[in-house]
Structures are given as C-alpha cells and as structure tokens.
Image: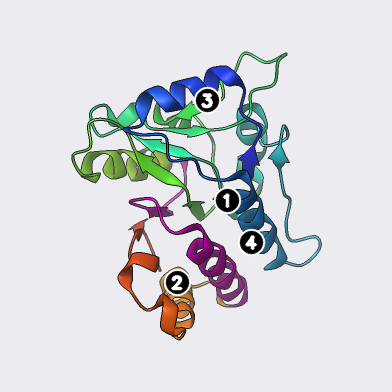
Amino acid sequence: MGNPALNEQTAERIRSLLPAERAIAALDLQKEVDAVGSAYGEGQRVIFTGADASEERLKLEAGKYRVLHLASRTILNEAAPLYSAVALAAATESQQDGLLDLREVIGLDLKPGLVVLSATEPALPQAGASRSLTGLAWSLYIAGCPSSLVNQWQVEPSASAELMPAFHRALNASGQKAKSWQAAVKQLMAREDRRHPYFWAGYQFLGDAR
C-alpha cells in the first residue's frame, strides 16, 4: 500500500508536524510500490494506491496478508510516540481522518509476520527516534505483528526503490528477514555509487528479524 491520495486536511496536519516540508515525490512512492509488487507473482500480492490506499481499507485488509509494505509518509513523533502516524487516503464517506496513529494500530488484528515502513520522517522536536521507534514496535507487537523494518530518517528515494524490491524478492524466496535484508544491502553496495551508508544505513529491524 502506498502513494495515497491525501486530502488537504491530512496534508496540512503533516506540514504542521514536520520541521520543514521536504516533499517525497508521488512518483518516487509509486515507483517503489510498483517495484515491490513486481517482487511477487500474480496471486501473491494485492496493491492499493491513490484513493484505494486508505486508512479504512488498511484496517479492513491488513490482517489478511503475511507481509505488509507501506510506502506512505509516516511521522515519527518523539514527544508523543503513540501519536506517530501513517498518512493515508481518507474516504469522504468514512469517519477516518487519514492519519493512522499508533493508538489505532494497537487495536488492529494483524496477521503479517512483517510490516515495512519505508517513508518515515521525524516530527518536531527532532531529538532522535528511540522512543517513537520503541512505540512503533510495541504497538505492532500488541496488534499481532512481531517484526518491522523502518527507516529512521529520510532515505534517498532512488536507493529505496532499489533496496525494497531486492529485499522482497529475497524474502519471498527464503522467508528469512535479516538474511534477505543483508542480501539486498550487499546487492546495493556492489555499485560504486551506492556504497556510502547514506544510501542504506537508515533502515532498522525492530522485533524478531529471523
């Protein structure tokens, strides 16, 4: 699920939470969603983008799959970790506001063994991300998901678009989370222009990475 069609109210709330508006291009998010989807064959994947990438649909659908990938802006709130939230589309006829915060995540019945959040950003004030990441892992665990892969800071979109499908291809083949991520990073680092940690060190496994 990714590249959601955000309404103006959701977009304005995001702008109020971030230290500066550093737009993640919709094209970058869409490329990532398409690339991750290509790592799985027909019948192995379901893709929701635009208006279909809604908070309401995520709540209805998330418990059906073994892996959930969210290529959507996610705000890490260090001051109030349980108010960290994933920005999603909000259907006009629903009661959802388009921001799925961790208090709501706790109430979900998740079945995925892994949730990937690839577009997280720290909210104001910026003081690391230890409490918000702990809150994220705890909330997902309470909801039923033992493992998550999260970027701690904004990663170069082109690197993310390479890393994520490589990781999912390896994961789909082996089912081993940490080893699949290691293989994806090694594949990226094989390129001379992608060896610097800037392109891959921002991601962190939380919970059970076996």
Q: CA distance from mark 2 to mark 1?
A: 15 Å
Q: Mark 4 highlights which residue?
A: 36
Tell me which residue sits at (67%, 68%) in the image.
39
* Label 4–label 2 contact, CB within 8 A: no
Answer few, some or many: residues within 10 Å of disc 3's Cα (few below 14, many 20 plus, some between 14 and 19): some
Residue 180 in the image: state x and y as whole percent: 48, 74
Q: Could you say where residue 24 lies in the image, as x and y percent from the top left?
A: 51, 44
Give me the residue at 39% from left, 54% from top. Answer: 151
Indicate the amino acid at tag 4: Val
Kind of residue indicated by mark 1: Leu
Element class at badge 1: strand
Q: Provide the residue span drawn in magenta.
A: 144-173
**Mark toward the viewer: 4 or 1:** 4
Pick the quarter of the image with the N terminus.
top right
Q: Is residue 59 left or right of residue 82?
A: right
Q: Which residue is mark 2?
A: 181
Q: Nearer the viewer, mark 3 or mark 1?
A: 3
Mark-to-mark CA distance, 4 and 1 = 11 Å
Q: Amino acid at mark 2?
A: Trp
List the residue tagged with mark 3.
Answer: 11
Tell me which amino acid carries mark 3: Ala
The residue carrying mark 1 is 68
SS label for mark 2? helix
Q: Nearer the viewer, residue 173 or 100?
A: 100
Report, in whole angstroms, how far the alpha carbon at label 2 lies from the one at label 3: 32 Å
**Residue 5 position by quadrant:** top right
Q: Earlier in the sequence, mark 3 or mark 4?
A: 3
